[in-house]
Structures are given as structure tokens and as C-alpha cells.
Image (cartoon, grey):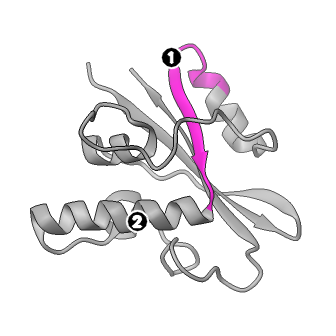
Amino acid sequence: MGIGINMHIEVKIKGSWEHYACPHIYRCPELFGLLAGVRNDDIAPICEPKGLPRDITVITQMDYADWEGDAHHASWLNHEEIECLVSRISEIQLQNAGRFEFEQDYLRTYLFGNGFAGSLPTGVEDVRFVFWFDN
């Protein structure tokens, strides 16, 4: 049995965090290493796991509650950390596979038709990836 990841994308609109998406992400040791140092000792994580945000959305909280007994390395990345993640995983994947697009190849979702790194769409104050792993 392998390790899986559960991720929720949350956006801040008018000062409140809202649930945006729950992408299905395939197992990828490079991504797991960058997110939290999980399953890849050769890649330094963007940041050490910091637990769930205290102001997590209800949808994300409900999903986490279903996994709580098996969930580990819970954390989240802010917009600046997401930009770092996209840059670092792109470098790794371009060396290995050539063409690569984070949103298409990993998340299979976009932020209102755009990527998650760079400028945020009008009306979106912030974005974060909330995630945990399960066995």
C-alpha cells in the first residue's frame, strides 16, 4: 500500500477563506518531497509541515476529519510558497520529461483559468494549498 495526498485549494475573497477545489493528485515522490519532505529524502521541502491553518474552511475540515486517524504531515502553503513550489517542481520535471505545466500535469485545475503562481485574479486576495498525506 502506498502513500497518498489529499489537497484542498482555498481562496480568500473579501477577507474570508472559501473552498475552491479538491484536486486529485497522483503519487509523485518529487512533489511529496517538496511539499513536506515525505517519501523523498533527496529534495528539501519548501517548508517544514506546519499543521492545518486555524481558519480552515468547513469543507476542508470535514474531509480532514474523515482521514484524521490516518492523516499525517498536515500542512499548507501560502501564495509565495506556492510560487516557489511551482518553480522548483517545474525545474525538476523539465529535466526529466521536457514539457511540464504544474496545473495541467498535477492539479488538473486552474485558478479561474490561470496558474497559481504569479498575479492573483481580480477579487482574489490570497490562495493557499492545504494538504495532508495518508497511508
87, 25: nearer the viewer: 87
- Residue at x-position 44% and y-position 45%: 35
The image position of residue 40, as x and y in percent, is: 27, 35
Badge 2 marks a residue whose secondary structure is: helix
Q: Quadrant of the N terminus?
A: top left
The image position of residue 134, as x and y in percent, is: 44, 25
- Residue at x-position 34% and y-position 58%: 106
Badge 1 marks a residue whose secondary structure is: loop
Q: Indicate yes or no whether the magenta region holds residue 133.
A: no
| Left or right side of 92 for 103 | right
Looking at the rendered structure, the number of numbered marks drawn on it comes to 2
Up-down relation of residue 9 to residue 37 (above or below): below
What amino acid is labelled 1 in the image?
A: Asp
What range of the chain is rendered magenta?
Answer: 65-78
Quadrant of the image occupied by residue 120: bottom right
Mark 2, Cα crowd under 10 Å, few <14 / some 14-19 / many 20+, is some
Q: Which residue position holds label 2? A: 86
Residue 83 visible:
yes
Q: Which residue position holds label 1? A: 70
Q: Are marks 1 and 2 in contact (CB under 8 Å)?
A: no
| Left or right side of 86 for 116 | right
